[in-house]
């Protein structure tokens, strides 16, 4: 059964900052976004000739090295910046990194923040708040007085890249969400909406639930990928959530109960075209699954 998503529906004179930081190496359960965060936005800004500064904890050519726990480095990263695309993936869910960036942005005179949040943030499930850290970050951004746009996708199609080694080894992929369905989104669509929000005022003070065009179970995705790769793909159901932070357990439980089973028209309305399908994403990334690690 499809549920109704609960949501409400500029020029860059000084350039844009793309602020992204992943988790420390070795964090198995909360890796940085694979193709769904800053890297895709950087590609689109480059193609469009929009000046930007990419922030990362790691040293990157032409980028700004900064850490959300280092206010001085954040101040350098957002100096003379008009708009920030904010992606945070802390090892333990917390709004602290978002709040630190908001503080630095206000002090530097940043005008707008486009935040990558998550679908369902703020909903209640099993006595807890889904995506509580995203909700707290959104509230901090709204209270800052800055212009904002919130992007709330469900699972990215690119999440399946986490399982490349298992697929190549013929080992089963762990299915944490059971038979629940989600409108898996192509991260390229999320990036395109983000760039649209960064470079225009048409999306100011809006929240977008950015979904794909069809509801799929984890097994559905595996079957599609199996057809694309022309090799067997195994999955195994698991409820083993004891290694995850409590906030992530709440989100997975909410999704497992069908909370994310909704399709919106936000991607087509913003981009003027259909949202990408999981199958098309898989075909476009076939080599990523077949290449030797």
Image (tube, helix red, strand yellow):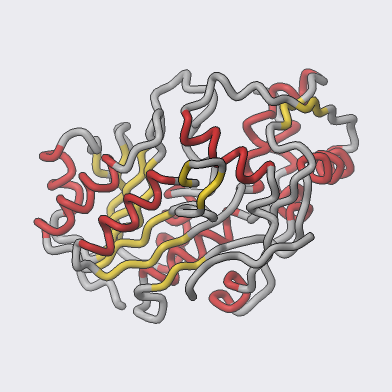
Quadrant of the image occupied by residue 256: top right
Q: How many labels sit on residues?
A: 0
77 vs 184, nearest the viewer: 184
Q: Position of residue 225 (x, y in %)?
A: 81, 42
Q: Is residue 58 visible?
A: yes
Tell me: 112 left or right of 50. left
Q: Is residue 61 visible?
A: no
User: Height in image: 31 above or below 9?
Assistant: above
The residue at the point 78 percent across, 53 percent down is: 279
Q: Quadrant of the C terminus?
A: top right
User: Height in image: 281 above or below 290?
Assistant: below
Q: Position of residue 159 (x, y in %)?
A: 62, 40
The residue at the point 64 percent across, 53 percent down is: 260
202 vs 50, nearest the viewer: 202
Q: Position of residue 73 (x, y in %)?
A: 15, 39
The residue at the point 24 percent across, 35 percent down is: 67
Q: Position of residue 233 (x, y in %)?
A: 84, 30
Tell me: 171 left or right of 114. right
Quadrant of the image occupied by residue 56: top left
Tell me: 224 left or right of 110. right
């Amino acid at each position: 059964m499809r549920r109704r998503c609960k949501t409400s529906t500029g020029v860059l004179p000084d350039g844009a900052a793309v602020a992204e930081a992943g988790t420390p190496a070795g964090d198995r359960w909360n890796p940085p976004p694979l193709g769904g965060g800053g890297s895709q936005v950087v590609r689109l800004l480059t193609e469009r000739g929009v000046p930007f500064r990419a922030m990362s904890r790691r040293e990157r050519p032409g980028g700004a090295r900064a850490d959300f726990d280092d206010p001085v480095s954040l101040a350098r990263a957002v100096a003379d910046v008009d708009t920030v695309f904010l992606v945070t993936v802390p090892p333990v869910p917390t709004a602290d990194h978002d709040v630190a960036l908001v503080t630095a942005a206000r002090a530097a005179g940043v005008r707008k923040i486009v935040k990558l949040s998550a679908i369902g943030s703020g909903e209640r499930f099993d006595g807890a708040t889904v995506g509580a850290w995203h909700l707290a970050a959104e509230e901090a951004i709204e209270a800052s007085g800055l212009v904002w746009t919130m992007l709330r996708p469900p699972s990215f199609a690119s999440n399946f890249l986490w399982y490349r080694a298992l697929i190549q080894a013929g080992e089963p992929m762990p299915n944490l969400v059971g038979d629940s369905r989600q409108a898996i989104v192509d991260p390229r669509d999320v990036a395109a909406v983000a760039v649209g929000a960064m470079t225009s005022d048409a999306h100011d003070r809006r929240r977008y639930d950015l979904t794909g065009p069809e509801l799929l179970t984890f097994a559905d995705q595996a079957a599609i990928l199996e057809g694309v790769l022309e090799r067997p793909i195994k999955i195994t159901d698991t409820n083993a959530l004891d290694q995850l932070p409590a906030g992530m357990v709440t989100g997975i439980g909410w999704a497992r109960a069908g909370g994310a089973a909704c399709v919106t028209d936000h991607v087509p309305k913003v981009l003027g075209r259909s949202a990408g399908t999981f199958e098309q994403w898989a075909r476009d990334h076939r080599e990523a699954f077949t290449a030797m690690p």
